Amino acid sequence: MQSTAFDFENNAHKALDDAELRQAMARVATNFTGGRAAAAARLPEFEALRDRAVEIKNHTIANLDHYLALFERNVEKRGGKVHWCATPREARETILSLCRQVGARTVTKGKSMIAEEIALNPFLAENGVEPIETDLGEYIIQLADEPPSHIIGPAVHKTKRQVADLFHEHHRKYGKEKILTEGGDMVAEAREILRQKFLDADVGITGANFLVAETGSTIIVTNEGNGDLTQTLPQMHIVISAIDKVVPNLEDVSTILRVLARSATGQEMSVYTTFSTGPRRDGDLDGPGQFHVVLLDNGRSGLLGTEKQDLLRCIRCGACMNHCPVYHAVGGHAYGWVYPGPIGAAIDPVFLGLEEARHLPQASTFCGKCEQVCPMRIPLPKIMRHWREESFERRVTPVVPRTLMEAWAFVARHPRLYGLGARLAARILKALGRDGKIVSLPLGSGWTDGRDFPAPEGRTFQEMWSARRGARS
Amino acid sequence: MTQKPRVALFVTCLVDLHRPSVGFAAVKLIEEAGAEVFVPAAQTCCGQPAYNSGDRKDAIAIARQVIATFEDAPYVVAPSGSCAGMIRHHYPALFAGDPAWKARADRLAAKTYELVSFLTDVMGVERVAAALPARATYHDSCSGLRELGIKEQPRKLLATVDGLDLVELPGAETCCGFGGTFCVKYPEVSVEMVQRKADDVAATGADLLLAGDLGCLLNMAGKLSRDGRAIAVRHVAEVLAGVTDTPAMGKD
């Protein structure tokens, strides 16, 4: 997708003005957080499982070359093929050429954030292959021609009424004229329309939550079963994934699965956990004739050995955004690219460059909630701070805030000067106050446009303390 | 008679400039707990604004100054979870590549405390001698809560304030939107966050809002004031020390 990350401030402004978005986001703030808290509380070993999950991923990342090579060998042993792609462009072209091999006209798609990362849908459409999203949330936003606003709930920014309107507008051509009001009826209508598309598709494309090195399997976790139909019915199954998804073995997968759904939706397990191991074998009743895994790097290997390496542990559960008060306020689209919320703030600069994504790591209060709930204990605020440091050093941070900070720091390094400045500021601010508050702060409209600034007491603690000490002695 | 433990007060830049009464309340509480307070004159700020803005060089320079100023003190206490968290958790990280300073940062970190947790966890304070007839609610400031584990300590002491009725704030652990320079860098987002907080506070029916960090308090007091709410806002130390004769924040 085209990034609008650079326009974060503007995007946020629009989002805050959008009454329907606010209504939709209010649900995110309560449902997901409550769900995770209850799920974690029901499992006494939850914290220990998080620790184990972190160890598994750290071990895998430390031996990434080994496990990726092992994964490839085992995919091939079972008749599949791995395609290594350094860039989104290579991945797009690889997928298109695979589609062309079977003369594909339509492809069904399970939910995949990597497909968003490489902007697959518009590329396929431009090249005469129609992509059809089959995850309900993805289906909704495909109708709306919008990017996802959440990594596991792509349409969380939509209200039920908006979905009803979209269905009414786009389903008329199937003879569906009625405006629906019940969620259940909308699901039924989408299911009915998608059924034929599953049967007609030439290729099924899914993502992967895990790549299992020891078996060459790819795994998706879903709640709708659309992924199974997507990958089982067509003659070719293409898995689009990235190199950070590999784990050593099935035992490790089962450990991580125990924290994944609990962190994401508060479920103990997602409804479907689907393993794909190679194409259909002789004697199998169903399954694709061809099995391909397109493995994207897109800068991930460049994180190895850096202070941002911990990002590679991410299992894309969405807990960080589900719990983020900034995300709750502005929604996912304000971030302007594929990965919103705290994980996006930490990882989008890898893909977009710091110049384009500079706001994202700044737009956090460092409240620490994301790190607290991240099943993989990724130190997201710390990584955002590293980006801020890089921004400051490389002068991506604009000159005014940078100069103000350096001037303030100069004063803070000189206690006598600082004391003088503080005494002066205390007096000026006190004088600006009426009834104990300042309603308009010169050069401080950022504060006072939306709230008062309580006036200070008028003298500094240090001067009062010295005066008191003087009086005592 | 055993000698009283000596405590260096890290006043914090916001208390120094904005609300000295919090500093005096802290002194009173520490003295009543049986320790002796001194206030190094060479202190300014912990450097967190620079650190969180990516100005690592200045953050290190300021941290060195704080370390040099406070390292001889047996204890360092700040009426702020944010500044105490900076010294306890982030100073050692700042000097990760500098063994000599890292050792000094580690030593300072180990003896630095947020005020209320110092009273309960180090000095063993079980109750305070204060009275205030009010219906109060308490906001957990992020750094104190998540970096230092401060949750029960203020509630435990507030429960011993005569006449004070403490009601839990729904979403007490949700950030108020202050976030240091965040509140002026992204003012619209910050105001939206503090609006939600102010609405939650008002919904409790409390007439007094307390917290342990002046940054969050300024933000919440400013929003409640702009919304015309009659809810008084104070630092928790003022109530625990029984020093509530100064006007509440944003009041005259």
Image (cartoon, helix red, strand yellow):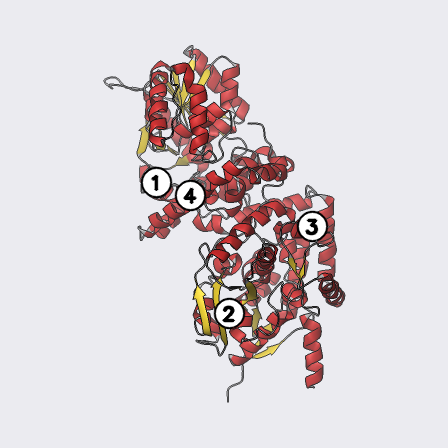
Contact? badges 2 and 1 (CB < 8 Å): no
Q: Secondary structure at mark 3?
A: helix
Q: Position of residue A96 (x, y in %)?
A: 48, 16
Q: Which residue is mark 2?
A: B116
Give, as a three-letter code, the residue at label 1.
Leu
* Closer to the eye: label 3 or 2: 3
Residues A67 and B176: in front is B176
Q: What is the number of the mark on residue A59?
A: 4
Q: Is residue A375 visible?
A: no
Contact? badges 1 and 3 (CB < 8 Å): no
Marks 4 and 2 on same chain: no
Q: Which residue is mark 1?
A: A257
Give, as a three-letter code, the residue at label 4.
His
Counting residues from the start of the chain, the first of labels 4 and 3 encountered is 4
Q: Is residue A80 visible?
A: yes
Q: What is the number of the mark on residue A445?
A: 3
* Closer to the eye: label 2 or 1: 2
Q: Position of residue B197 (x, y in %)?
A: 52, 53
Residues A115 and A463: in front is A463
